[in-house]
Image (cartoon, grey):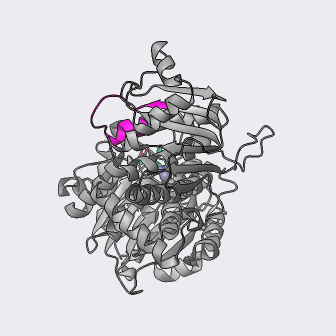
């Protein structure tokens, strides 16, 4: 078992014994549950179920349970192998409806192959395939033996990624005012892990619960991201944050434009100037540590609910996609939900500067100079480089929480898509240990990030004749100069910046929010809870 999975088992099991709950499903509370997890310490083939999912390495080498299944079904596995329909090769999946001899409606056989070890990525690819099959077969419930796969990875990882895979497959944007909706949207999938012994049951429970919490967080992030810009405004995000007070016991505060004015947030307010929608600064606090005063980990998310570019207007093509420009904020909402559901023993504060960026007669113009909350003046040479303008004041504000670490998450630059595609987020920071922790969380969660060099030489590109800083750094290294701009506001913090412009939506999935960076942020915080 990996270090972080061991820690997760410890955290979850402490929590379960403290609350004396034997049924893992009772601990996860959320309105938006896509998957519900249960653990059973039995692998009997006599279970009545909609679907029995069995992972096996090779039909030639069956475990005792699998041999029993083979007998009960009158040698089904042998026959499948004889007919070259299923040998247990990695990635092979067959679904057998109403199999004879066992009380399952469907039997799904999954091949894990002969390789001794599989990478987490290979495990996840296989589980994504399984989840797709379950969706196509319209299956809403499954009992799974995962031992053959767990041997090649570990039980907690397999359980967690299966939950996430099913969650991703079943996600549907339910708020859309479209007539034809999938009837299954919003229906919870019931997943039961069948475990051999107490140890694997504990690991499956820990991994399953982490999967459910992350999936719930992702679902919230996807819903907010997919929502149209005329619905999901800064005020709407603020109202959602207030809902989390009751549902997830967060402490929420919303600052108005007047409050921000008093704090001197001239940079943030320069972005909302051209919009009818008032900007909001949303603060959500989660207290899980024994000591309420323990330094929190801060997450700061860009909540630009629509980015037209402002006076530096964007071209028309694909401008609709700029409704996703609040996906950094959405990942902060999602991670806060996940952390609260896992009841992690740490403190976390989420800070979301939220605004629209619109052209208007009183909108900020290229060449305007504004004063940020830090006192540094900024020459706005391009009103489309607005994300950094709202984030810098939010980062200055975050100092008041005396945070242990600060991560900002933003759909900040188109350049990061050119460099890393839709697969990998750009990562920079002023503290290598923090950056390394985030990279490692990316590996575990498969929500990958890649470090870019944040060197002083890039900060020089932000020189201005009229202010302390310009808000753009010229045509080269756009992602890094954006990070360099933010670094001028975080010198006293242990800080890192994730550019998720490529990973938050799009790519092979099309125009859909992905729920990223909820997995990497939640994993980072799970790991901090285990430090
Ligand atoms: N929200 C955009 C970044 C973006 C662009 C995300 C395309 C996803 C797809 C950001 O506010 C922006 O406009 N950035 C500019 C910066 C430039 C003016 C220095 C960009 O990347 O073009
Ligand atoms: Mn922009
Ligand atoms: Zn933007």
Which residues, given as a range, are shown in magenta?
109-125
At 23% from the left edge and 54% from the top edge, which residue is drawn? 454
Q: In this view, does 138 lie to the left or right of 523?
A: right
In the rendered view, tell whether residue 486 sits above or below residue 185: below
Residue 360 percent coordinates (x, y): 62, 56
In the rendered view, tell whether residue 229 sits above or below residue 14: above
Q: Nearer the viewer, residue 482 or 282?
A: 282
Q: Which of 509 and 371 is in front in this view?
A: 509
Residue 429 percent coordinates (x, y): 27, 60
The answer to whether one can see residue 417 in this image is no
Q: Locate the N terminus and report the quarter of the image it occupies.
A: bottom left
Q: Locate the C terminus and report the quarter of the image it occupies.
A: bottom left
Asked if the magenta segment contains residue 244, the reply would be no
At 46% from the left edge and 51% from the top edge, which residue is drawn? 195
The answer to whether one can see residue 90 in this image is yes
In the rendered view, tell whether residue 122 sits above or below residue 479: above
Q: Is residue 116 left or right of residue 197?
A: left
Asked if the magenta segment contains residue 113, the reply would be yes
Q: Which of 366 and 82 is in front in this view?
A: 82
Location of residue 258 (image quadrant): bottom right
Residue 530 percent coordinates (x, y): 32, 69
Residue 335 percent coordinates (x, y): 48, 62
Q: How many numbered circles are shown?
A: 0
Residue furthest to the top in view is 83
Q: In this view, does 464 lie to the left or right of 334?
A: left
């Amino acid at each position: 078992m990996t270090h972080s999975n061991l820690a997760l088992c410890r955290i979850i099991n402490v929590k379960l014994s403290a609350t004396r709950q034997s049924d893992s499903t009772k601990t996860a509370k959320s309105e938006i549950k896509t998957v519900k997890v249960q653990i059973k310490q039995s692998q009997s083939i006599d279970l009545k179920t909609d679907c029995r999912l069995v992972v096996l390495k090779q039909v030639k080498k069956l475990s005792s349970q699998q041999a029993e299944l083979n007998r009960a079904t009158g040698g089904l596995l042998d026959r499948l192998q004889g007919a070259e329909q299923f040998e247990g090769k990695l990635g092979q999946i067959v679904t057998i409806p109403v199999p004879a001899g066992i009380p399952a409606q469907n039997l799904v056989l999954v091949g894990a192959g002969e390789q001794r070890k599989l990478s987490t990525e290979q495990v996840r690819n296989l589980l994504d395939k399984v989840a797709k099959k379950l969706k196509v077969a319209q299956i809403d419930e499954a009992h799974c033996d995962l031992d053959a796969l767990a041997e090649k990875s570990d039980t907690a990882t397999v359980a967690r990624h299966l939950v996430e895979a099913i969650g991703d497959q079943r996600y549907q944007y339910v708020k859309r005012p479209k007539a034809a909706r999938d009837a299954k949207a919003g229906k919870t999938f019931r997943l039961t892990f069948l475990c051999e012994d107490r140890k694997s049951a504990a690991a499956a429970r820990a991994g399953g619960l982490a999967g459910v919490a992350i999936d719930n967080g992702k679902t919230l992030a996807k819903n907010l991201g997919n929502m149209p810009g005329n619905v999901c405004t800064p005020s709407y995000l603020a109202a959602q944050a207030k809902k989390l007070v009751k549902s997830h016991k967060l402490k929420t505060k919303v600052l108005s434009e007047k409050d921000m004015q008093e704090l001197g947030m001239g940079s943030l307010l320069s972005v909302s100037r051209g919009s009818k929608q008032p900007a909001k600064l949303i603060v959500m606090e989660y207290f899980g540590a024994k000591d309420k005063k323990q330094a929190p980990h801060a997450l700061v998310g860009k909540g630009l609910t629509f980015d037209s570019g402002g006076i530096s207007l964007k071209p028309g093509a694909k401008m609709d996609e700029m409704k996703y420009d609040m996906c950094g904020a959405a990942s902060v909402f999602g991670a806060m939900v996940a952390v609260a559901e896992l009841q992690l023993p740490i403190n976390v504060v989420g800070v979301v500067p939220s605004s629209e960026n619109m052209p208007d007669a009183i909108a900020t113009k290229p060449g305007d100079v504004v004063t940020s909350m830090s006192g540094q003046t900024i020459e706005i040479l391009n009103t489309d480089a607005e994300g950094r303008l709202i984030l810098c004041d939010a980062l200055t504000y975050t100092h008041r929480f005396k945070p242990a670490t600060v991560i900002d998450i933003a759909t900040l630059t188109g350049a990061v898509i050119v460099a890393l595609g839709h697969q990998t987020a750009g990562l920079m920071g002023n503290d290598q240990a923090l950056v390394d922790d985030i990279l490692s969380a990316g590996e575990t969660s498969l929500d990958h990030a890649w470090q870019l060099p944040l060197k002083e030489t890039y900060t020089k590109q932000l020189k201005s004749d009229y202010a302390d800083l310009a808000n753009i750094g010229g045509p080269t290294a756009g992602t890094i100069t954006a990070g360099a701009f933010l670094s001028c506001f975080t010198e006293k913090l242990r800080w890192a910046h994730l550019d998720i412009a490529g990973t938050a939506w799009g790519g092979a999935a099309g125009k859909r929010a992905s729920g990223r960076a909820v997995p990497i942020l939640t994993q980072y915080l799970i790991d901090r809870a285990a430090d």
